[in-house]
Image (cartoon, coloured by chain):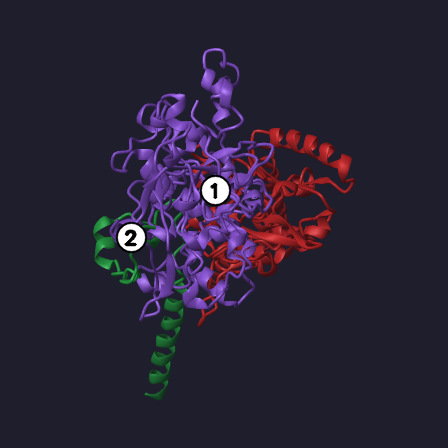
Amino acid sequence: MEVWEKAYIKDSKFLESSHGMVGCVICHGGDSSVEEKETAHQEIVIDPSEEGCNTCHSDIALLNDNSLHTTLSGFKSKLEARGGDLSEGSALDTAFDNHCQQCHTSCGQCHVSRPDEMGGGLVSSHVFKKTPSMQNNCIACHGARVGDEYLGNNENVPGDVHWTQAGMTCARCHGQELHGTGMLVSDRYSNSASAQCEDCHADVWTDTDDNPQHQQHLGDLDCQVCHSLAYKNCSSCHVALDEEGVPCRTSEPSQMLFKIGLNPIRSAERPYQYVVLRHPPTCAGTCDYYGSDLLPDFDAEPTWKYATPHNIQLHTPQNESCNSCHGNADLFLTEDDVAPDEIEANRGVIVIEIPAPE
Amino acid sequence: MKLDRRGFLKASAGTAGVVLLGSQGLGTVARAASSGQDLAMLVDVSKCVGCWWCYAACKNYNSLTETIKPDPEDSPELSPDCWTTLFPLKKGDDWSLRKQACMHCTDAACVEVCPTGALSYNELGFVQYDREKCSGCGYCAQNCPFGIPQLGSNRITGAGVMDKCTFCIDRVSNGQPTACSEACTTGAITFGQRSELLDNAGKRVTELEKQNPSANLYGKTELGGLHVMYVLDEAPDTYGLPVDPQVPAAAEVRGILKWLGIGVTVAAAAGFGLNYLIARMRIARGGERE
Amino acid sequence: MKRLVLAVFGLVLLAAFVAAGCSVPPGPTPGEEVSSCVLCHTDKDLLKQTASVVEEVKSEATSGEG
């Protein structure tokens, strides 16, 4: 998006809407009586939604204030679980502000413009969109993993059937849950309102007469174990500031892998024994630039995480027959799949005994 | 023509009397505006969340100087550049806000005292004004029980004209609602037939009274009936509204004095004219005698 | 002569006052779109002209995927 395009209001639709009929200054400040740009933009507020939506949309704002997109509590909880000190001004806190904080989104960055992380810019001539744009908002940030999987951008791996066959956008499954439940949660799987396959496919629990595989494995295996394909796994991300003090990062090239492991977050809602695991970029030395041993308890959390790859298929190599999965060591996360310095961290998820062939 | 002093005095008193009665008659016609067909607004303070969009819409529509959303701590005052604002009432940690602007009274003191007729009643019930006719005398500002009219002031001469809420006369005459009521996000400001709004207001007050005995309706009969009425959750004076406002006695008197003044001036001019004619006649007659 | 000068000066002063008094700022015109924000931000060409070139603050040192 060109710089000028980011602030261009193409048609009058917005100006006639309830948000647009009261002039620009009430939210953005500035001076609407002068034509000279610098003077008009004095004390301008580029993103008034950091504070401004709460007055009228108080019920949503109350929930959203504690959402993952706002608080980034998902990142924070993992860092703290690893012994990280995120108190104000600490080394880790600085690292967080420089790098992780970029993922924070305000109301406007989903509903009016593109996220700051992507350079901002009006998505729809300033019209307030109840449902954010899949391409401009969701995939703008969640592109490398989920976006590419879902759309089928990974080589040799088809896209998710919900997209390729049903044309469903992100919002079809992930609606109000994104505003959170009002409570601070430690990760996205703790959100009781998050999307479940059963929301639409509840019949898998009742059609087991026709489906011996479901009969056998429901509740024991996560849906993705049988219905998902290879997905991106990253590693060795290191963040730093370059010579000019600009935040930067490096990481190893990603690998397309499919690994089944033990469920690290077993609960009543997720009773599965085996689930699909993904390796995110984090490593013990991720924040080394900012200080040594900033995560003293790194092994407290596995580095192979509960994953729900968005490349669902009905038929996959591993669900062709019993033995395409049973006895197939490649599919499972075994000790030799895990980097030596991460084995301790992943004790809880490494599969020691692969299910035997039938 | 023979006209002695007594005759002259009788004639002028008679003229003045006729003129006075005439002006009273005009007043009665003007006050009949509140017939039930007139338009009004109802402001329900309990529904206001303090978004300031009524303020912003008014500024935007009337091309006044726009500002960023104000803080209730620092609520803007009414001015020639600000025709509606929010009167802030601190309630614990929170604020209760009352939209404040011209009340568009049925018996408007400003209309009564305006010497140039710039302020007048519109047939739809509200108080309109013609900026071209305003002399900047400030009588309206001095006599309004709510302190609404605001006068501008030229830095050198002090001259200025009055500005206030126009009830969006251009919009309203075209069947559109006022800008503030349209912009209101919670429905705290409603616009429509005054009789209908009164009905709704009554029901709302009854509803509020269950939780809050102080709930009341302001503007039903005050000053002949206001065209901006309030459903309040506290006594009116808590919200800066005068209890039982009246058109100031001075305004009433001024109404009379205005016509008396005109009458006296006319009488004086007539007197001069008559005197001239009589004197000329007498001089001519005196000349004849000699 | 002195009186004439004084009289003329007085008249000029009076005229100045009257002129200043007559120049009451024009009333706002309701319904007209005079907000410069909208005038500029709906004009593609004007935006292109006045757009500031924002330095992309992406470090050269960044590599790998996001």
Colour for chain A in the figure:
purple
B123 is higher (above) or lower (below) than A227: below
- Chain bearing tag 1 is A
Residue linked to disc 1 = A350
A296 is higher (above) or lower (below) than A272: below
| Identity of the residue drawn at 37% across and 64% down | A240
Colour for chain C in the figure:
green
- Cα distance, mark 2 to mark 1? 60 Å
Q: Residue furthest right?
A: B213
The image shows residue C4 at horizontal and vertical percentages of 34, 83
Residue linked to disc 2 = C40
Q: Give SS at disc 1.
A: loop
Which chain, by letter, is red?
B
Closest to the observer: B87 or B26?
B87
In the figure, is residue A209 to the left or right of A168? Answer: right
The image shows residue A36 at horizontal and vertical percentages of 30, 62
- Please tell me the numbered disc located at residue C49: none
In the figure, is residue A61 to the left or right of B252? Answer: left
Q: Are marks 2 and 1 on the same chain?
A: no
Amino acid type of the residue that numbered disc 2 sits on in the rendered structure: Cys
Name the quadrant containing residue A331. top left
| Identity of the residue drawn at 54% across and 26% down | A219
Amino acid type of the residue that numbered disc 1 sits on in the rendered structure: Ile
- Chain bearing tag 2 is C
Q: How many marks?
A: 2
B75 is higher (above) or lower (below) than A337: below
